[in-house]
Amino acid sequence: EVHLVESGGGLVQPGGSLRLSCAASGFTFSSYWMSWVRQAPGKGLEWVANIKKDGSEKYYVDSVKGLFTISRDNAKNSLYLQMNSLRAEDTAVYYCVRDPYGAYFDYWGQGTLVTVSS
Amino acid sequence: DIQMTQSPSSLSASVGDRVTITCRASQGISNYLAWYQQKPGKVPKLLIYAASTLQSGVPSRFSGSGSGTDFTLTISSLQPEDVATYYCQKYYSAPLTFGGGTKVEIK
């Protein structure tokens, strides 16, 4: 059974940094693209970034380009999101999602809440 | 970037009703469209990909159609457990944009 477990969320001040992690199990991690999707409180879904199976390609939504970095460690079955220069508008639940072809999202973690506030 | 517009933003229907949600792309995206269901307080769930392919385990009362710029998600007979917000998402190219969502309630 596919399991995706996020960690690393919390309260951070504006301008601060945070690193999210996602531990994957139940599938061959290195065979899949992976994505981060976020959802601000009471709002809709927003794709943030994705990364190819071997880490050779990465894509970002414009609002986080140059601020966030997605990475993966296939030996550890783990996905990461380094978030720098955080702003109030980055406050959201961040979901780790499996992304079969760099396309749609077939399995979702439970999410980790990031709150950016002073 | 290609924008995705869903309509209506919310609807209320009776159990057993046929419900249709529309998603429109600002440019043609072939059939590179997925639909998700998010029940209150829950994680989103993939319903349909490639515009009309039902994800494994999804009830057959859900169906999708369309190509190019106009797409629909249809629930053939609304059930109480279908109360949720539904999102479309395009994957023709990055960014992988979601529509604004359609909240479905029971009348």
Image (tube, coloured by chain):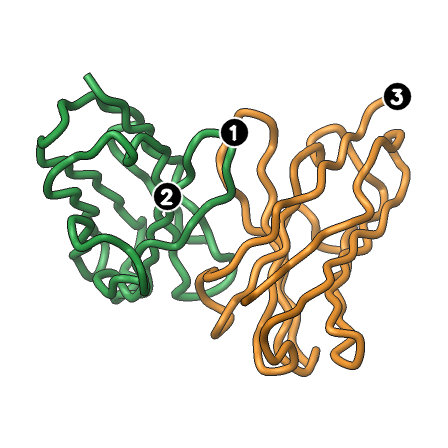
Q: Are marks 1 and 2 on the same chain?
A: no
Q: Secondary structure at mark 1?
A: loop
* The C terminus of chain B: image quadrant: top left
Q: Which residue is labeled 3 in the image? A: A118
Left or right, B52 with reference to B41: left
Q: Are marks 1 and 3 on the same chain?
A: yes
Question: How many neighbours does mark 2 have within 10 angstroms: few (below 14), some (14-19), or many (20 or more)?
Answer: many
Q: Position of residue A98 (x, y in %)?
A: 55, 64
Q: Position of residue A5 (x, y in %)?
A: 69, 55
Left or right, A5 with reference to B34: right
Chain shown orange: that is A
Q: Which residue is labeled 2 in the image? A: B37
Q: Is residue A81 above or below residue B40?
A: below
Q: Which residue is labeled 1 in the image? A: A43
Question: How many neighbours does mark 3 have within 10 angstroms: few (below 14), some (14-19), or many (20 or more)?
Answer: few
Q: Amino acid at mark 2?
A: Gln
Q: Amino acid at mark 1?
A: Lys
Q: Is residue B95 above or below residue A9?
A: below
What's the chain of the residue with tag 1?
Answer: A
Q: Residue at x 33, y 28 (%)?
A: B103
